[in-house]
Amino acid sequence: MTGQPLSSALLAQPDLPWAALDPPPVLIPLGMTPVSAGFPSPAEDYADRRLDINDYLVRNPVSTFFFTVRGNSMQDADIDDGDILVVDRSIEPAHGHIVVAFVNGERLVKRLHRQRNTVALLAANPAYPPLELRDGNALEIWGVVVGKFKRIPA
Amino acid sequence: MHTSTPTVALVDCNNFYASCEKLFAPKLASRPVVVLSNNDGCVVARSAEAKALGIAMGVPWFKIAEQALQHGVVALSSNYALYADMSNRVVDVLSGFTPELEVYSIDESFLNLSGFAHLDLAAYGQQIRQRVARWVGLPVCVGIAPTKTLAKLANHFAKKRPIFDGVCHLDRLDETTRKQLFSETAVNEVWGVGGRITARLAELGIETVEVLRTADPEWIRQHFSVVLERTVRELNGTACLALETIAPPKKQIMASRSFGSAVFHLIELREAIAHHISRAAEKLRAQGAEAGAVTVMIRTNPFKPTDPQYQRSVTVPLAHPTADTLELVETAAAVLKRIYRPGLAYHKAGVMLSELQPAGARQCDLFDHPTQDARRHATMQAMDAINQKWGRGTLRAAAAGRAQGWQMRRERLSPAYTTSWAELPIALAR
C-alpha cells in the first residue's frame, strides 16, 4: 500500500463501493448557541442529529427509487394498495426477494422464485396464480424492494 | 514519489434522454423513441431503434411526424426534471471511482484516473459501466486516454465500434490499430473541431484525425488558431486542457425560449421578458455577480416563411452594474418598447446579461444611493430564499405577469418519475 494514495488503494478493491466506505454526511451543529456571558445550555454537549427516515429506509440513495403500489396481490407480504415501495437497484436479486419486475410491458411487484431451473414471480395472495417465466416472456428484474411506507389520514 | 502519466476517462451516457424515458416505461422497451426540444420542436435524442430508422438529429418533428408515427415511433417532450435527477445519480456513482471529476454536460463527465496505473484500466472502465447500469439503469460508454481530447475520441470509438464492448482504452491499443482508427475517422469527430474549421481543413487536405494529428502544430497555429494547435498537441498525448472540477463563473447569462403559441401584444412580450430577466438575475446573484449590460431579443418564426419576418436584438449598458431584478426588468422593458413592432406574430423572446463582474466591486458615484441599494439587496435575498423554498416563481416581479400563456408547450411529457410524489411509477400488484 505504500506510495499509493489512500483513495486509489480503497478503490482497487473490486466490489467494495466507495459509497459504502464513507460514513453518511453528518450535519454538525455549528454555532448552535451564540457566545453569551451567562451559563451555557446544559444540553449543548448532547446535541445530536435528529432522526431522518431516509437513514432508516434508504441504504444507497443513488440507486434507490420509489414506486406506488396498485392492487392487492401482495397483501400477505404486508404490501397494500397505495403503499410506496422503496426499491434499491444496487442489491443483487435473489430467491425470495420481493422485486419490481418489468414483464411483457408491465411493471409488477412480485416475490422472486428462482430455484434450480425454474424462475417464477409469485403473488402473496392465494387469489393470484404464480407467473411462470418461460422463454418468450421478456423479464427484467428492475430492482429489489427493501422497504415501504404510507401516510395515515388524520 | 514517481510522477505517473496523466490519464483521463470520459464517461458518456448513451442516448441519454431516450434511455431515461425507457428506464421507467416498459412499454417503450423495444420501440423507437425520440425526445423533442422545447415546445416539441426538433428531435434532440434518439433511441438506438430510432437511429436505425434513419431519423436525423435536430430534424423538426412536424416534418417527420406522419411517417415516424407509421413506424411506431414514440415522441416525447423533454422531461428536464427526470433527466436532471438521473444525471445527478450518474455523477454520484462516478464520483465513487475517482477523487477528481469534471461534470462536462448533463450526460458526460471527465474522470481523472492519473495514479491508477496499477489497475487494469479497461477492466476498471467495465466496472464503471456495470455499476452505472446496475445502480442507475443507464447505459454508458467509457473512453480512456492521456488527454481530454483523446478521451473524447476514445469514447466515440467505444460507442461506435462493438469490438470495444463499450470501453476503449486508447493506450492499450497497438500502434497500427490506433493509426487505422484515426485514419478512418473524420476530423469533425474531434472535440472542438466544428463545421467551419472542418471545411477549411478539408480545403487543405486535412480530412481525417490521423492527418490532423500528424500536422505541424506551429503551422496549425499560424493558419488557424492557438486553440486548434492545442487540439493537435492533445491528439499527440500532450495534455493541454486541465480538468475543470469547479465550473468557472459564466461570462454571460442567457434566458430565452420559444413561445407555446404565437404572441402578438407588447404586454405579453413584456411578461415573457420579465420572466426571463427574473431567472437570469437569480443565476446572476447565485454566482455573486452583477451585470453591466442587458440584451433583449425578439423574433418571429423563421419556419413560417409566409409570415412577415422580423427580428431585433439590442444591448444597452447599465449606468451602474446591478443584480437587482426590478432594476433589470425596468431596463429590459424600456428596450423592448423600443424594438417592438405591432401586428407581428412573435415566436421567441430572450434576454442576456453580460459584462458580469463580482458584486460590490464598483465604486460609488454622485448618483448612487447606498441605503436604497442595501434595502434592494435584502429584498433580492429574501426573494431568492422564498423561491428556492416554495418553488420557482412564487415571488416575482409584477411585470412577469400571472397567466404566462406563452410558457413552453410540452404535450408529450412523461411523468416526473423520481422528483414528484404524485408522479411515481406504478407497480401493479396483480
Image (cartoon, grey):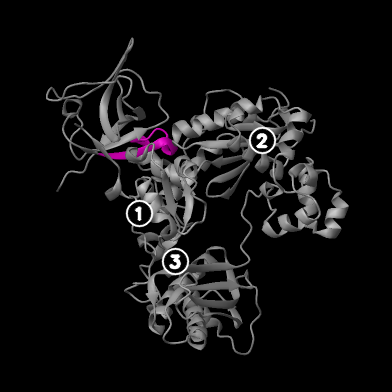
Secondary structure under badge 2? strand
Q: CA distance from mark 2 to mark 3?
A: 41 Å
Q: Is residue B419 magenta?
A: no
Q: Which residue is mark 2?
A: B144
Q: CA distance from mark 2 to mark 1?
A: 36 Å
Residue at the far top in the pictured view: A116
Q: Which residue is mark 3?
A: B384
Q: Mark 1 or mark 3: which is in front?
A: 1
User: Is residue B337 in sight in this rendering?
Assistant: yes
Q: Is residue A116 left or right of residue A129?
A: right
Q: CA distance from mark 1 to mark 3?
A: 28 Å
Q: Which residue is mark 1?
A: B413
Q: Is the same chain shared between marks 1 and 3?
A: yes
Do the numbered discs 2 and 1 sit on residues whose CB atoms are within 8 Å? no
Q: Residue at x 20, y 26 (%)?
A: A77
Q: Residues within 10 Å of mark 2 (few under 14, many from 20)?
A: many
